[in-house]
Image (cartoon, rainbow, N blue to C red):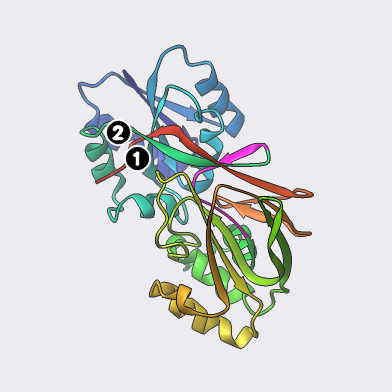
Amino acid sequence: MKHVFMMHNVKKHYEFKKTIEEVMEGYDYEIIMTSSVADGQNYIKNYPDKARFYVVGGDGTLNDMIQVLVHSVHEVVLLPLGTGNDFCRFLTKEKDPKKLLEQSLTLEAQEIDTVLLNDRYYINTACFGVDSVIATHVHDVANVPLIPEDKSYLVSIVKHVFSYKNDKVKIIVDGKSLYDGQIVLCTFNNGKYYGGGFPITPKADVQDGYIDLCVVDKVPKYKIPYLITVLLREKLYIRKEVHDYRIKEATVYCQNSCNMDGEEYKANKYHFQIQPNSLNFVLYK
């Protein structure tokens, strides 16, 4: 089986190219440098044989590539070179993409779940509320001088959390209203982390056939910093304003956009459906 590395025409990917060449010596591999999402997707769609595709980047890049990898015979490896890297954070504590590449070569792919949101798949999270605003605008500060890229989410939180106007969501499950009201946040997760490392759904499992849903009621803004500290301790579920559910399918009505794996997504209504065992993915140990 061939090993195919999907990379962007950007500086840090070119720098990582040397690492790939070093680690992959003796393997059957190729490195594909793409100029656009469409280039990468078309290359994968037209690939003639089963291959192991290495997605080099963050959650947004992975989201783009899985659109043509879900329900295929291909295997997927994620090498983290993005801003938040939340899905990789869910997979492993290791952050060094070289070490992860070396580890991946010893591992078999496993079937994992994805989520279908209207007509687009995602692998980690889709959220409404203040977390959506923060994630959507994180790239506004990602290239600001003196701010490390891995701190971009924290800067976006400080910038937006107190100016945020609460979204209103209505969630329908099995034909019944599960939730209807104003929220601070509402997230439909396949993975555990979002927002640059916040463990919003600590019991999430990408192989259990469920979406983990967390909704936090509207609260006074002065309470939000405290809720963030509780969230970081993985104790958010003890708060009375917090509601956790495990679902397979839901329809959401919200006038505002959501953020899906780091990218803004806007629709008239949002239909979520778990896609069990839909992606062949290498899970790090």
Residue tagged by mark 1? 16
Mark 1 Cα-neighbour bin, 10 Å: few <14, some 14–19, many ≥20: some
Whether residue 169 is situated above or below residue 19 in the rendered picture: below
Residue 145 appears at what percent x and percent y?
A: 51, 65
Q: What element carries label 1?
A: helix
Residue 39 falls in image quadrant: top right
Q: Image check: 270 left or right of 60? A: right
Element type where label 2 sits in the image? helix
Q: In this view, does 75 lie to the left or right of 40?
A: left
Residue wearing tag 2: 20
Callout 1, which amino acid? Phe
* Residue stretch in magenta: 119-127
Q: Which quarter shows the N terminus?
A: top left
Whether pointer 2 and pointer 1 mark residues with C-beta atoms closer than 8 Å, the reply is yes
Say which amino acid is labelled 2.
Ile
Q: Where is residue 73 in the image (x, y as percent from the top left)?
A: 43, 21
Viewed as shown, does residue 262 lie left or right of 264? Answer: left
